[in-house]
Amino acid sequence: MRLKDHPSRNAQKNNESHDSPGSPRHRKVLARWDPDEACRPVIDDAPIFYPTEEEFQDTVGYIESIRPRAEAYGICKIVPPPSWKPPCPLKEKEVWERSKFSTRIQQVDLLQNREPMRKKSQKKRKRRRQFNSRPRRRARSESSEANTAGESEEKFGFQSGSDFTLEEFKRYAEVFKETYFRVKERTQESSAEIGQDKRWLPTVNDIEGEYWRIIEQPTDEVEVYYGADLETGMLGSGFPKDSSLLTDSKISRYVNSGWNLNNLPRLPGSVLSFEECNISGVVVPWLYIGMCFSSFCWHVEDHHLYSLNYMHWGDPKMWYGVPGNRASSLEEAMKKHLSDLFEEQPDLLNELVTQLSPSVLKSEGVPVYRVVQNSGEFVLTFPRAYHAGFNCGFNCAEAVNVAPVDWLQHGQNAVELYSTQLHKTSISHDKLLLAAAKEAVDALWEISVLKKENPDNLRWKSFCGKDGTLTRAIKTRVRLEEKRIERLPGATCFQKMEKDFDVNTERECISCFYDLHLSAASCNCSPDRFTCLKHANLVTCCDPENRLVLLRHSIDELKTLVEALEENTFAQRVWVSEDGGHLSPKNLSDSILAAHSQLFGVDLSSMKNEYTEDSVYKVSWADSDPERRTNFCVEVVNLGSVVHGKLWSNKDAIFPKGYKSRVMFYNICNPLIKSSYTSEIMEGGLLGPVFKVTLEELPQESFVDVSAQKCWLMVCRRLNQEILTQRSLGKEGLPPLQPLGSINGLEMFGFHTPSIVQVIEALDPHHKSVEYWENKILNNKSSSSTDDNSLAAEKNSLETRSDGGEITDSFETDILAGGDEETRSVFARLLRKANPEEMEILHRILCKGSTSSLWRVAFETLTEEIQRNPK
């Protein structure tokens, strides 16, 4: 299909051409078949597939299943089961006899052999070289073709033709074909030879040989009509889609079928299902009403999408395909053999007005494959597979695009290519990619946490995991985004993109037309002008401080998305929300509590949580404690993972490694506004956890310490300094100085928000953060001696063994008491008893790290063995 922005780029509108005396409709057909000069290409056929009734039920699934065998050809044919015979509404009398459609005039003899438009203005016309040059006759005088100097920039294209009804077009197409191939004469000759009256018709091979003779060795002018790119919203679709027909079970089968091209693009498993606009020719099918020799020239689909074409009725359609991985070879061959045309118009292939014989392509080492499509058959083209062809007579076909998940990588390559070619896009690739990823994360959550399985979520699960198709596509995009952000100037100001940034208006780079759904560069002086990150340097502003970069998601958020697709449950929690990656603490807590009353052995339902309308959380830890309140709404970005060690928790909180949150506070550079700060916990080696607070819009403004409280204390000090400085300059409306003890660092990190505390506690099901859990138990126990004894027993249990029978701190202390040398010695003795296979498995487990499922299985197995063989 072509771009929605250029619905008629090949048709040069000329109202005078309609029914004009000089149009093909009003001229005699002078050209004739020359069988002795046939130029039928000697090429191989593409594969043909015959799905069973069962395979035919899942359209996208079947396309995915044949891709490994068919993609190497670029094109293939699919023959439906014999029972699949959809009725065609276009044959109803009201449409057939009364509905008109527009056509375009194609000069078939000029599709390959023509001069550049600028040469037509020269007095002495020089004929372009033909591959096997022969003189040719033209029905019109040469002067009628000449352009004035002012027309020298005109592009070669297809003029608008007459409007026809289907009945009229069928009559015209049949007369043309009979006249061109001298059907009456041939019928008389053959009848005389065989002694009976039998109508002679040219074979498909006859028509193919003649078509390429016209293209390669034209001797006559051959002009035909083609009703191409007809919107089904105007003439109607060839498939039934009226909901009123659903009462008829025979018809409803076709109305609802995935092979009904009105349904195909938005089927489950097609990424185009996330496209909200009804883009004509991409999501909404187009009709093609053909006649003999009407052509579709070499092209690839928009955004390198798949396409599926169905022949409703009529004479065969000839197809030629080149594999997607050889697209560059075809482009080079065409530029070599049609160099003057490409010199005049470098984007010639985007115009769909130029053929080049498969024989020529084959001579250049480009593999080309043939498909003969008959009535009732489908033709599938693969991503970036160039295809071309022509019709053998009157017929009607319908086509639309589809995007199985494996298309995403091709689609990414397409938008990057478009950017270099300054080529407009017709869909937002990033929007589709993120929507698909979000859908997949929701599916993984349903399976792993809610324990719900169905065909749809299992399909999405098949694209996830470390090496999943969807995971790889997201990783590729995140790496691109990360590199582009790294190349930005150090003083770049970042700002969170509004969710509705591109809802009502398509945003594209003013330089290269790159889609800006994920990120954009702009300045406050020109709020409606945006660039992509590659062209951020084009954002010019009188004040550099007014320049900014809008990010829909930070790199950390996108990396968390990758982890979610890799089936990290905690990362999935961050993204399982309505606003995708921006999960509020309350929603996060509710999501988990709704999934299970117990998570990893921790009873979440017993944790008290009250949410008030003014975003204030209220939690009671013990009857004797005062109410603990927080007036800061903390947003979790990444939960991280619990590390077992003395420094990674204290009596007040557990500090997960990789934890990250976001909170609004006065901007330390401009106290008049509040901005977003990220608080995160990093690995500090012997120091244990290292806490970092960063002003999101100015990442260079960060504060690092081994204490969360000290980090935010530094923020307050810096803020107060800025307030005093701006006061001295006479600025008004500034906030009061912040008392250094007024901000609680743990609160700003989110460790006083009950719902966040609940989830972090769930990350430590075996209570290995001893000091924290001891303090919690103390606060919930009475001061009676009985309870003291219970506390001692609880403490002993914590230090030795978890409820799940896992050997914990005391075992670790005993076994490691001898130090590194003893550990090395014991481990070496163990390895000497292992065979190569056992050592390879052990190496693989250790390489995976303690968060992997392999590590957990190994640890559980070791624990069981220790229990069976105590000291």
Image: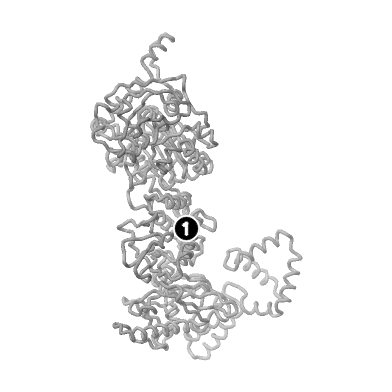
Q: Position of residue 137 (x, y in %)?
A: 37, 22
Determine whether 71 is above or below 213 in the image.
below
Which image quarter holds the C terminus? bottom right
Q: Position of residue 248 (x, y in %)?
A: 31, 39
- Left or right placement of residue 690 versus residue 258 in this view: right
Residue at 51% across / 70% down in the picture?
600
Determine whether 56 is above or below 845 in the image.
above
The front one of 320 and 659 is 320
The front one of 539 and 486 is 539
Disc 1 marks which amino acid? Arg
Q: Position of residue 109 (x, y in %)?
A: 39, 28
Q: Which residue is mark 1?
A: 477
- Left or right placement of residue 71 versus residue 91 in this view: right
* Secondary structure at numbered mark 1: helix
- Left or right placement of residue 164 versus residue 179 in this view: left
Which image quarter holds the N terminus? top left
Asked if residue 32 can be seen in this view, the reply is yes
The front one of 710 and 855 is 710
